Amino acid sequence: MSENIEVVVIGGGYAGVMAANRLTRRADVTVTLINPRPAFVNRIRLHQLAAGSGDAVVDYRNVLSDRVRLVAVVDYRNVLSDRVRLVVDTVTRIDPATRTVAPAARPDLGYDYLIYAVGSGSAAPTVPGAAEFAYRVGTLEEARRLRPALDDTPVSAPVVVVGGGSTGIEVAAEMAEQGRVVTLVCGEALAGYLHPRIRRSVVERLTRLGVTMLDGPDATAVEVTRDAVRLSGGHTLRSAVTIWTAGFSTPDLAARSGLSTDAMGRLLTDETLTSVDDERIVAAGDSASPSGAPLRMSCQSARPLGAHAADTVLARIEGGRPGTIDVGFFGQCIGLGRRAAMVQLATRDDTVTRFGFGGRVAAMIKESACRGVIEELAAEAREPGAFSWLFKDRKRGRKVRAAGEAVPVGR
Ligand SMILES: Cc1cc2nc3c(=O)[nH]c(=O)nc-3n(C[C@H](O)[C@H](O)[C@H](O)COP(=O)(O)OP(=O)(O)OC[C@H]3O[C@@H](n4cnc5c(N)ncnc54)[C@H](O)[C@@H]3O)c2cc1C
């Protein structure tokens, strides 16, 4: 083995990039970041990218350590002098026994430690016709597919957004602000996660934007065709463009590699984020399931989880005991077009309160959060270890919710 400690990070999203940057605290650590795309995706702007009102793609040079050289190599073993290497590829298998990962287009790569940060994507719709005819916004490729479809559709044509969660609300608001005729199909309830008081304000804003909201027992989409969405109550909505936002899913790489996962496929870890199967594998972000009681999948938790995963690896390298996670929430900020947003405040363990606020102040907070995540990653690249977060080092531990207790899965 070389003198360097080789850490492979799978997934170059918020958690993976944060972890990769933080790991460069140690001069003897070499980080290889593997991601399918050569650019960073600021996923929290994907609905803006789809609507044509914002961009979500950021050059990795702006968020990874300045020691990073972007490498377009066939055999990355030729670039051992770099501290962090970006390999543009998709890992198809992890082999904990030989401590190797198998990228799709390159030879296997060995590691001393592995950070599993493969994130999440849109859930595959189970409703007939949805996979074929509905667009999604969970990944860069999906959002990019939607964009030309909207460009080719007259503004007066009906757009149906399926899913009454935060992503559905943001997509519907963004489209309506552009003058489109939008129906939001919510299923049982619009934003069930929100406090009723805050939900009312969201409904008011969407109403002002002209969005028609359908919820209740008759408002579940049961079939999608090329130009319509059929609802559980029997009603059929005309739809020139249908956008499916319901649900998150996680890649099945961990399960395929024989590692223990929760029911959603997230890597099962202890409270230090270490895999329950292997001390050399640490998870972060949406694809981590600490104690089988994962945090809400979100950018908000992915960054501190990424930092904590790096700290766990660094503690092990130093022969110390890794700390337990101290990540909590402040609530949620939902964009309602580019000129308004709604902040729902919550307790540390993500239980909503009756407090929140909206309007332009909330919109400014939303926009500064979208910029702020990039600035945070860049700051950690410049000064590894600098990133801190709400509740860091409050050694109360987190309240682990019981299985089945109400908590939103994503966002
Ligand atoms: C439209 C939209 C708006 C959102 N708004 C908010 C918001 O306002 N606030 C909030 O907190 N959250 C928001 N989210 C959720 C947030 O984006 C995710 O929870 C967050 O991206 C999770 O970060 P991550 O680093 O765990 O994973 P990701 O950002 O998903 O990154 C994972 C990376 O791993 C890569 N990867 C996957 N499999 C492999 C593999 N086998 N090999 C190599 N690489 C792989 C992926 O391609 C990706 O680049 C939003 C999501 C969407 C879609």
Image (spheres, rainbow, N blue to C red):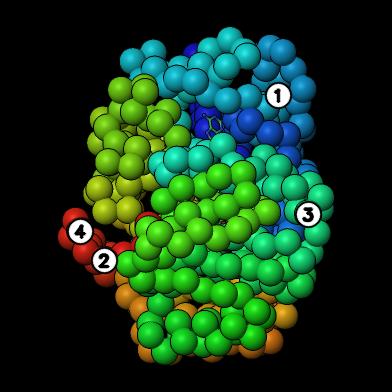
180 displayed left or right of 192: right
Q: Cα distance, mark 3 to mark 2?
A: 39 Å
Disc 1 to disc 2: CB gap under 8 Å: no
> Element at badge 2?
loop
In the drawing, what numbered circle is on residue 153? 3
Q: Identify the mark at residue 406; answer none if there is no mark.
A: 2
Of discs 4 and 3, which sits in the foreground? 3
Separation (CA) of disc 1 from disc 3? 51 Å
Which badge, 1 or 3, comes first in the chain's sequence?
Answer: 1
Q: Which mark is on residue 81? A: 1
Please, what secondary structure does the residue beneath circle 4 have? loop
**Contact? badges 1 and 3 (CB < 8 Å):** no
Distance, label 2 to label 4, CA atoms, is 6 Å
Q: Name the N-terminal-most of marks 4 and 3.
A: 3
* Image height of 30 relative to 170, above or below: above
The residue indicated by pointer 4 is 404
Between discs 3 and 2, the one toward the N terminus:
3
Q: Quadrant of residue 355?
A: bottom left
At label 3, which amino acid type do we have? Answer: Thr
Is residue 269 in view from this perspective? yes
Q: Residue 215 versus residue 202: which sits nearer the camera? A: 215
Q: Residue at x 30, y 22 (%)?
A: 258
Image check: 81 left or right of 258?
A: right
